[in-house]
Image (cartoon, helix red, strand yellow):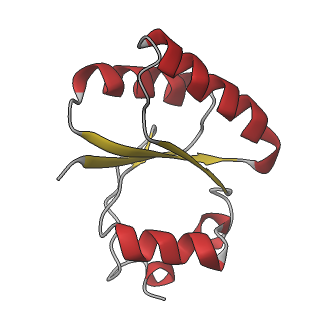
């Protein structure tokens, strides 16, 4: 099974650099979720394209998710919460800290 990564702070500088390094090092990437503020979505889409272009157009499984780390359950809609609940048991939030969340310790995922 491939690795699933979840980043906050994209398309900011730190998360941007961490993602580029991750793509260089992790050959088993299955998906990279990017938590993006609504007003940053267009910029994030352009930046994911730039990252793919750096890898000669290699398709990287980015999924941009609109939310806000200052909101309860990251401001996710019910649909997004259900998607995470159904697809992933654990994910990491970067760049500042790596936190492993699960249905057990984050009730919002147990819908």
Query: Residue drawn 45% across and 69% down?
Result: 84
Is residue 17 placed above or below 4 in the rendered structure? above
Residue 53 lies, in percent from the top left, at 52, 14
Is residue 62 placed above or below 21 in the rendered structure? below
Query: Residue drawn 59% across and 39% down?
Result: 9
Is residue 43 placed above or below 92 in the rendered structure? above
Residue 97 lies, in percent from the top left, at 40, 45
Q: Residue furthest right?
A: 39
Q: Residue furthest left?
A: 1
Q: Tell whether 13 sits left or right of 98.
A: right
Query: Residue drawn 60% across and 35% down?
Result: 10
Q: How many labels does the image show?
A: 0
The quadrant holding residue 12 is top right
Is residue 68 placed above or below 44 in the rendered structure? below
Asked whether 95 or 103 is in front, the reply is 103
Asked whether 37 or 78 is in front, the reply is 78
Query: Residue drawn 45% across and 39% down?
Result: 96
């Amino acid at each position: 099974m491939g690795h699933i990564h979840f980043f906050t702070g994209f398309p900011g500088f730190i998360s941007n650099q961490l993602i580029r390094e991750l793509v260089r090092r992790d050959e088993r990437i299955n998906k990279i979720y990017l938590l993006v503020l609504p007003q940053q979505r267009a910029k994030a889409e352009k930046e994911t394209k730039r990252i793919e272009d750096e890898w000669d157009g290699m398709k990287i499984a980015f999924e941009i998710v609109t939310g806000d780390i200052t909101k309860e359950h990251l401001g996710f809609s019910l649909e997004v919460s259900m998607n995470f609940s159904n697809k992933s048991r654990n994910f990491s939030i970067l760049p500042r800290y790596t936190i492993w969340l699960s249905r057990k310790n984050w009730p919002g995922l147990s819908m």
